[in-house]
Image: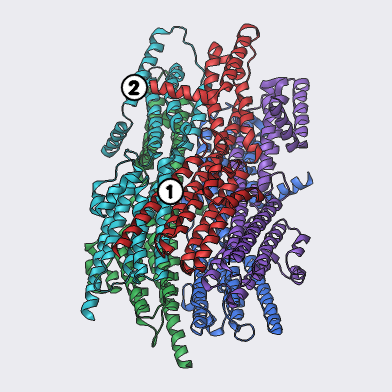
Chain colours: A red, B cyan, C green, D blue, E purple
Amino acid sequence: MLQTFRLILKTVRYVGWSLFWLLIWDIIVTAYYMLFLDSRVSFPLMPLTLVGSALVVLISFRNSSAYNRWWEARTLWGAMTNNSRSFAREVLTLVDDPDGLNPVKATLLRRQVAYTRSLAAQLRGEECPTEVATLIPAEEYERRSQTNNFANNVLQGSAALLAGEYRAGRLDSIGFMRLESTMVELSNCQGGLERIANTPLPYPYAYFPGLFISLFCMIVPIGLVDSLGWFTPLASTVAGFMLLVIERIGADLQSPFQKSEHQIQTDALCANIQKNLDAMLRDAARRGARARVAS
Amino acid sequence: MLQTFRLILKTVRYVGWSLFWLLIWDIIVTAYYMLFLDSRVSFPLMPLTLVGSALVVLISFRNSSAYNRWWEARTLWGAMTNNSRSFAREVLTLVDDPDGLNPVKATLLRRQVAYTRSLAAQLRGEECPTEVATLIPAEEYERRSQTNNFANNVLQGSAALLAGEYRAGRLDSIGFMRLESTMVELSNCQGGLERIANTPLPYPYAYFPGLFISLFCMIVPIGLVDSLGWFTPLASTVAGFMLLVIERIGADLQSPFQKSEHQIQTDALCANIQKNLDAMLRDAARRGARARVAS
Amino acid sequence: MLQTFRLILKTVRYVGWSLFWLLIWDIIVTAYYMLFLDSRVSFPLMPLTLVGSALVVLISFRNSSAYNRWWEARTLWGAMTNNSRSFAREVLTLVDDPDGLNPVKATLLRRQVAYTRSLAAQLRGEECPTEVATLIPAEEYERRSQTNNFANNVLQGSAALLAGEYRAGRLDSIGFMRLESTMVELSNCQGGLERIANTPLPYPYAYFPGLFISLFCMIVPIGLVDSLGWFTPLASTVAGFMLLVIERIGADLQSPFQKSEHQIQTDALCANIQKNLDAMLRDAARRGARARVAS
Amino acid sequence: MLQTFRLILKTVRYVGWSLFWLLIWDIIVTAYYMLFLDSRVSFPLMPLTLVGSALVVLISFRNSSAYNRWWEARTLWGAMTNNSRSFAREVLTLVDDPDGLNPVKATLLRRQVAYTRSLAAQLRGEECPTEVATLIPAEEYERRSQTNNFANNVLQGSAALLAGEYRAGRLDSIGFMRLESTMVELSNCQGGLERIANTPLPYPYAYFPGLFISLFCMIVPIGLVDSLGWFTPLASTVAGFMLLVIERIGADLQSPFQKSEHQIQTDALCANIQKNLDAMLRDAARRGARARVAS
Amino acid sequence: MLQTFRLILKTVRYVGWSLFWLLIWDIIVTAYYMLFLDSRVSFPLMPLTLVGSALVVLISFRNSSAYNRWWEARTLWGAMTNNSRSFAREVLTLVDDPDGLNPVKATLLRRQVAYTRSLAAQLRGEECPTEVATLIPAEEYERRSQTNNFANNVLQGSAALLAGEYRAGRLDSIGFMRLESTMVELSNCQGGLERIANTPLPYPYAYFPGLFISLFCMIVPIGLVDSLGWFTPLASTVAGFMLLVIERIGADLQSPFQKSEHQIQTDALCANIQKNLDAMLRDAARRGARARVAS
């Protein structure tokens, strides 16, 4: 019970002031109708139903598109995680260690973290974060403003390092191609994420549900007051509350990288990738040390 | 007939106490209206219809999203099964047997089982199960708390073993890459499963259907009692029963790894993988023995 | 006209006795109301509409899920066909023929047919069919009960044969991997089919539409009799007929391998694969003979 | 305005005679009711609404399934085009030219056109077209009736030619596999197209919308005549017209290879592939000639 | 508030004159009914509801199909971007540099831009833009009218250049195949885009929503005037406005390459690809120069 109440409170805060203004409006309409209108004009419900069903079609389409965008963005970040792990595993197992753990492995894993961090910032439209500076050479970090897609250049830098290993004979041709395939996957994830970040929903789908819901909420008390009397504010505020919540979540989900309660937690995902890659590097170092002791 | 009755009973148990409280409420409302209200106030059906159709949109969206999550989780576990079999087949056919069945094959198949078992536990938010300790080296099992993703490290361990076979000349480069591709697939399945386990439905979709259905069930008898009289509890309990069942199944399916009647049976799937892999290893051993006898 | 009538008749047989009982019930309700009830109690249509729209949501979800399962199963069997043909083409072109057509080619194509046949039986929950015994070695067929997934072991047997060709130098490493990739695809199709066969729809989705439709059909005449009078049985039987047909097809499609008019015709698909593979083998033999004559 | 009128006329022709019979029926019902029925029996609208909403669910499901089948078929033919181009590009760049343009290249590109043409005929259930005889050896064309899938045998023939080039040392192993991967894609497209052509929609979905719409159109004037009077034929013919158009397009799209205004234009697509391949061959010949001149 | 007003204004301009004519019509109907009709004929709402719900089904299907086409086109252009980057990265890392940066790399990157530019023009049904002439040899540009798919020939030209590098020993076999795989992806994106550009929605879906919405908007005031009186023009214009906006956006999205406010910004996407490729080439040149200095 208490939990339900807390949930309702949380939701009320989620919707915010709109709900308050709606309540005020509902009360004004009801009071005016009950106190000052003598003739008791009866407003037909037909237009309410008409607008209502057009609204339902529009909102359910918008919200499911918004959810699909959000879920696709989340799926692509998930794939970014998987591919980062696969990239790390392939770097650790396919590149040779002439003596001790090849230092390029640690470099590549760090670069992969830098890649995801700079991509995350790019998607939010932010500057490349300073922690990236600790992961890649300073000189490379300086050039971040000379390109319109720094993450892509970081990835190309990793590819160049791998090409160096290949030409130095520490990575065979087939292994190199396996790593290149993983980088193709990373590129595809990046491209998909950029597509979602750069292509908003067509604006009629993005803004109209909010507009029409406001309109509808303003009409509702006029349509109901004749039959519900003084209960009108209660009924129409509850109905409006539902609509405002549904509208709000659609508006949040349609831009999955913009600041909102439901935005994709890219920083947490990047931190997770970093932890996974650190653990893998530690394991590989331990295994290598043991192998050297054994031989 | 009897079967239908048993099915209804099972469903009633599935919904549980909510149904009972709903019935009580329906009876109270009806009794109060029929016995104490003189003026027979007529409540209009309009708000009921309004809330009802908003509810239908919300619930049908929620339930189909929940079902899609559940089915995607099931599909990914299915892919985990296929890829485990493919991994086993590739290990058994691509790695050379210098004399007798190469013992690393049995090790790798056991590790694959350990991988699926530890992943299943991770997804449910549980500790790594003790049976995993019998499948991998004790020392590796000890390190399970030093990483935030033990399953991933088990997989990397298998990759390191394969790299050892490759460097020892018992697995050629192309075969190694074929196995690495299968491990990429395994990583992708793991990542997809983690995505579903770690990203719940946005909470308005997760909790509101339940909230609004409760609200709706409480309003229904008030709206119906005027026209249905003493039949109200029957009609509104039946209608509420349907809604509660639909709500419950959506709530269950949206978290496919949490304890519920519909949760993904990860343990059964892991046991199945283990049986398949055991049968494949047995076949390979028999075939190898026959080949040695023949030569 | 006649064709339409035949179609209706076919559909009536498809729905079966339920329709008859529904008609009886409709007549009883109407007769009782028209003949014995004096006060002409008026039942409101509201609960009918309420239950009706919840029903529509539930059924349309169930039926589209069921159709998707059915179509996915059909798609996977289609992919099984394609991959079998690709497997055959690769065996025929990639494996060397030291003198005359390499006999292992015919063996592998027969084994592929055995694989699809035993998988089809497995999916229907049947014993491995006896015709498989003519396609694989007797000794292997004997072991069919020692494993919980015989089809998988047949596929592994083919992989072992290919590995033999590879070690004997009649198949190069890259060709072997191409064949292994095709076997990965076959494994994936098999896994997808097993997933559909082994994971039924969550039972509320599977059984409730039938239950609620029965309930709804029983309520309909009560709601209509007041306004339609003696036409009630006609109207409510026609409406019930539509609902029963929709329910029935959903129930059939949700288990695409179980005996029903719409089940996937796995035997016909297997026979088709066999014909395709026979024609391909015949072509290859003719081409090989001509090449030998020419040289 | 004129364009709108022309569009309506085109649509009326699209629906055809059904519309005329519907109009006649509407007039008969209206005239009978207005002229001969004295008591002005009032038919309730409830059954009309009931049947109407069941119809909407059924039709919207059928039409979206039909559209998906049609679009999937179109997508697969599109993929057939892409893969034919990729196949041609790979043949032209990967196979060596010992002196002048290797004649097998032109042969393989012609065979690819023969493959698409014979597949298109197969999907429509027609005989292999005679123009295929000009593209492949006469002897091979003769054998078209000895197989149940001639297109597949044509593809296998191309694979055998490529295997010949490989064994003759004019195509390396890895290039051969790249071409084999493209042929796997072609097989998959072919299989998908055959699946759509051979598996119709379950017949209740295919035939019932038409049946129920006819029934509904017959009931509509009876339900409306009481309130609309002499305007009934107009209103119910317009409503029926919409339903008949929606039904008709669903019926057309569900069998995308059968003769209808919306059928997939397979012949145009094949002609397009042929033109693309001719232009690519011409370019390659020109480039080769220039290279020989230069050297 | 002001922002909301600006949004409404923007939308009104988006819908255009239709809205004005609708308003005129609504006023005429209302005035005629209020001033000249004595008997106050009551028109039933039933046909309005009937046509309305058929309309909702039709429009929601059309709009979601149109949106899917638009989003698929956008996704394919996104994939074109990713694959162009991957192509550039592979060219830059896999092709050898005998002395200094191999000049073929810059050529191939320029050709890739030419490929996307000529494809973008092709999709819009325009001439190949003149800026392509600066990116490829003049002689090749001249031949643009001799083929029905110039973009495809540009891609084949790049493949021929890569084949030249391969035969000259500056690109190994496996790297060549990796690049060929990327070109297969480019072909697939091209094919998908051509499919969307060349296959419009079946015309009943494309034109009927507009037709039926016009019809519906004309009927609405007739149905409402009886109950709403002089408020009719307001109510029915607002309802019609919503419908016209929804119709308009569907009509725009269904042809994602045709001139409209929502068309895919292919030129901006091509410019973006060009910038990315330029930055990658610059980085590679700098890296190469440093390596030469170091050695």
Choose between E97 and C164: the one closer to the eye. E97
Where disc 1 sits, the SS reads: helix
Which quadrant would the C terminus of chain D be assigned to in this image?
bottom right
Residue for point 67% across, 33% down:
E242
Above or below, E268 against E212 in this view is: below
Tag 1: residue type?
A: Gly
Q: Which residue is mark 2?
A: B21
Q: Is residue D261 visible?
A: no
- Residue C200 image position (x, y, % from top left): 35, 47
- Dots 1 and 2 on the same chain: yes
Choose between D154 and D85: the one closer to the eye. D85
Residue for point 26% across, 52% down:
B139
Tag 2: residue type?
A: Trp
Choose between B105 and B258: the one closer to the eye. B105
Above or below, D253 against E63 in this view is: below
Q: Is residue B228 left or right of residue E257?
A: left
The residues tagged by marks 1 and 2 sit, at their Cα atoms, a distance apart of 40 Å
Which numbered disc, 1 or 2, marks the residue that appears first in the sequence? 2
- Residue C92 image position (x, y, % from top left): 43, 78
Q: Is residue A196 left or right of residue B156?
A: right
Count of numbered badges drawn on the protein: 2
For label 1, the crowd category at 10 Å Cα-Cα, with few meaning under 14, some 14 to 19 and many 20 or more, is: many
Residue D98: quadrant of the picture: bottom right
Choose between D215 and B144: the one closer to the eye. B144
Q: Which residue is mark 1?
A: B192
Above or below, B256 against C190 in this view is: above
- Residue A269 image position (x, y, % from top left): 47, 43
Q: Residue furthest front?
A: E294
Q: Are marks 1 and 2 in contact (CB under 8 Å)?
A: no
Q: Is residue A261 left or right of residue D272?
A: left
The residue marked by circle 1 belongs to what chain?
A: B
Of marks 1 and 2, the one in the foreground:
1
